[in-house]
Amino acid sequence: MKIYAITVVKNEQDIINYTLRNAAAWADKVIVYDNGSTDGTWEKINRLKSSVIIPFKQDDAPYTDGLRADIFNSFKSEMEDGDWWVIQDSDEIYNQSPRDFLAIQKGYFHHVNGKKIDFSFDLKNLESITLSGDFEKDLKYFSFCSPRAWSEPRMIKHRSRLVWETQNIWPNHMGLVCSQTIGIRHYPLRSLEQIRERWEVRKGVKERGGQLFDHWQKEDWKEYYAQKVNELVKVNSNIFEEIPLANTYKQGTIKRLLKSVLHGLKLLP
């Protein structure tokens, strides 16, 4: 079974080495699409180039999640039925190896949802923290997190008839979802300067006609930052069990039955 990680990145030079090395420990290939970095991220990616870490291309097209489809369509000829695609964002670490996760799952399913928690340093007490700008060195300060997690498709089983169109966030006909989620540690807030630059990048995406999620649509970066300050809770060893999901990922009985029949009869890929 092969696992290919799909990574789209822009201006993540402080964390990209750490996340790509972690992904390379469980993926057969980590394929990286740089969406126009200007901070040295693309140069770092190319220095990590190997048989596993693949710098795919750099293109500053307006961002949408559909950019991932470009990687899928460029590398799908290397995949066989039963292989897996894993979404590996540039500021995330899987709490468990996706390969190990798949090895212990039971039953019939086509994709796996993540349980993504935002981790952060203590935004209320910045004066007591001296951040180096090197994420791996600063990781010890990231002992706070959001009080809610988000679930979305993150692991997709390859099928020869699977279609992923560039205008779509996910492939067509995702199929049955796994009954379990895989934990994801998300690190979107890593310093005040990085938060400001992140907000400005996403503001630019909107101005160019790209995709912008609701939680970034604030008047300025300080408004976004202030919201996050008041939400954080302390991390503990059971955080993935204790933090609730803000949305649901499970499919109802009738929907699952219908999908099982349609996929079983190969009326859907």
Image (spheres, rainbow, N blue to C red):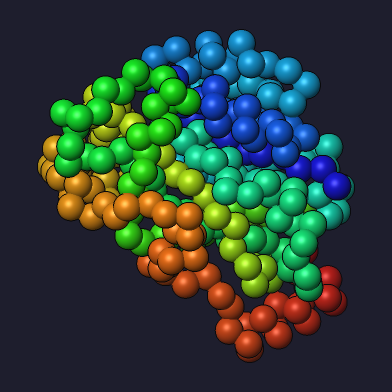
Picture mark count: 0
Q: Image point 76% across, 43% down: which residue?
A: 3
Q: Is residue 240 left or right of residue 1?
A: left
Q: Image point 69% across, 31% down: which residue?
A: 24
- Who is closer to the viewer here, 204 or 2? 2
Q: Is residue 44 left or right of residue 54?
A: left
- Who is closer to the viewer here, 85 or 66? 85
Q: Where is residue 47, by image quadrant?
A: top right
Q: Where is residue 204, by image quadrant?
A: top left
- Who is closer to the viewer here, 20 or 213? 20
Whether residue 207 is situated above or below residue 166 in the rendered picture: above
Q: Is residue 214 left or right of residue 243?
A: left
Query: Is residue 259 in sight in this rendering?
Result: yes
The percent coordinates of residue 229 (x first, y second) are 19, 47
Q: Image point 75% across, 79% down: which residue?
A: 260
Whether residue 43 is situated above or below residue 196 in the rendered picture: above
The percent coordinates of residue 160 (x first, y second) are 83, 53
- Who is closer to the viewer here, 10 or 224? 224
The percent coordinates of residue 61 (x first, y second) are 45, 29
Q: In the rendered view of the protein, which quadrant contains the C terminus?
A: bottom right
Q: Image point 57% across, 18% down: which residue?
A: 45
Q: Is residue 77 left or right of residue 74?
A: right
Whether residue 3 is situated above or below residue 258 in the rendered picture: above
Query: Is residue 35 in sight in this rendering?
Result: no
